[in-house]
Image: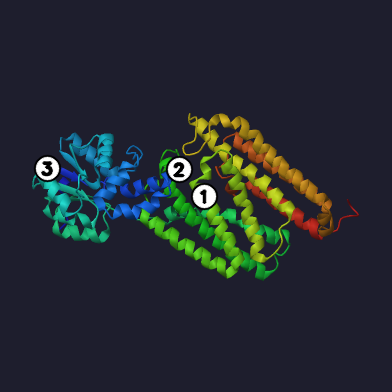
Amino acid sequence: MNIHLSDVQNNPAAGWPMVVDLDGTLTPTDTLLESVIQLIKRSPLNLLCLPFWLLKGRTAFKETVCSRTAFSAARLPYHEAFLAYLQDEKSKGRRIILATAAHQSIAQRVSDHLGLFDDVLASGTGRNLKGSAKLVAIQEKVGTEFVYAGDSRADIPIWNAAQAAILVGASAGLSKSIRQRNTIEQEFPKESIRLSTWVRALRVHQWLKNLLLFVPLLTAFSFMDIGKLATTALAFLSFSFAASATYLVNDLWDLESDRAHPRKKNRPFASAKIPILVGLAVAGCLLVLAFMLALVVSPAFSLMLLLYVVLTSTYSWMFKEYVLIDVIMLSLLYTLRILAGSVAIAVVTSAWLLAFSVFMFLSLALVKRCSELISLEQNGKAAARGRDYRVTDLAVLWPLGVSSAMSAVVVFGLFINAPDTQSRYATPSLLWLVAIGLIYWLARLWIKTSRGEMHDDPVIYAIKDRGSRSTVVVMGVTMIVAHFLVLDGLL
């Protein structure tokens, strides 16, 4: 029978100390895994050292990792409902002890930050407080009468010895097992990972960027070729799965900076709605699937995908922290998608298209940075965390972005007068209407940015914004008309 002691008058549990676990209970994340990620981020070479440190034992491993990292308890996500319960019990005078297998330094930081705990029991000085070892430490500190709050099967020996159990985020099977053997003081059910959470984590909306793979298909006017269309569709899925895999890993890489960001702190990993190990497993599966599809397209396309993964990873792990280098890398990654589309259907990409793409996407990347800096300025902040950008840099980034946009238009104008264009298009003069559309569209993006109305990703904004969509469609139709329709007598 499931008895909730808190619902019973003269609750005897009120006199029993409450012992609280940390990882998975007080916080939904794993502090050791987060420390390891922080350590690898500080120096990727540390990844090679991890197996050797682990050979010394789990306690020594935790000691080594924690001594080389600076863990922030202030930005750690917490189980809010359970935390409110602890605060309420503390206000009633109940004794609360933090008992965790995490290292002493992490546990103490959490205790100091929350100000709830009377004592802290944690791993260190040669002992790893997990399972039965934690039970011994608890009984030495508080005696045999206590209530234990936990979440995992490793806590079963402690629950068996406790007077009552508090279940926090435990699995359905574990919860059922504990209910059959223990009195339940309180239960905070585990939240299942919603489909919408996975959609956010995988950044499915970012797949729209990979529509750039279809650009060579359109510029070669091969969009009626079913074979090439199907090949490009497979290439699109391949790049999209690979992109989602890198987004998962990058979000883990950016945990600290995301938690300091007013909006990014709600991302699935930053808020610990998706466990770290689950995210890594899904990322691995997606990457394998991406390369399997790439091989179906062609071996050459597989190399393009590999280049994309390497560049986007080095961007996230290294280049994104350097001013201007990051936006140049972003423009190259956008252009790489167009090149990959050309390789997929075996067509030659013109130098005009590549030059136009570099300037165009450099401008869009600068829109992204300027929109972020404007958001920081509106929130009273002077610099971006994890990036070498300051609000004062807008004085330089603004003209650089607008001039890059106009450079793209100039390249397009030169393309119109190129001999190859004159021979390929029935009415090349119509392309000047496209140039005017580009001026309007790019200027509109920058105006929206100056007003603080720009989504931090301009490519996604351009696809979602009705005015942008209409402009792009009109420009596309105009190019098709210019290619097929002879209007020399009218122009």
- Residue at the (52%, 43%) spot, across then down: 320
Task: Please give the residue where the numbered disc 3 appears in the rendered image.
Answer: 141
Which residue is tagged 1? 314
Nearest-to-viewer mark from 2 and 3: 3
Amino acid marked by disc 1 = Thr
Mark 1 is surrounded, within 10 Å at the Cα level, by few (under 14), some (14 to 19) or many (20 or more) other residues, namely: few
Label 2 SS: helix
Viewer-side label of 1, 3: 1
* Residue 314 coordinates in the image, percent (x, y): 52, 50
Q: CA distance from mark 1 to mark 3?
A: 48 Å
Q: Label 2 is placed on what type of residue?
A: Lys
- Alpha carbon of mark 1 to alpha carbon of mark 2: how far? 21 Å
Count of marks overlaid on the render: 3
| Any part of residue 461 in sight | no
Q: Residue 194's spot in the image, x, y percent?
A: 40, 55
- Horizontal and vertical percent position of residue 242: 51, 59
Which residue is denoted by mark 2 in the rendering? Answer: 264
Please report contact status of discs 1 and 2: CB closer than 8 Å, yes or no: no
Q: Nearer the viewer, residue 2 or 14?
A: 14
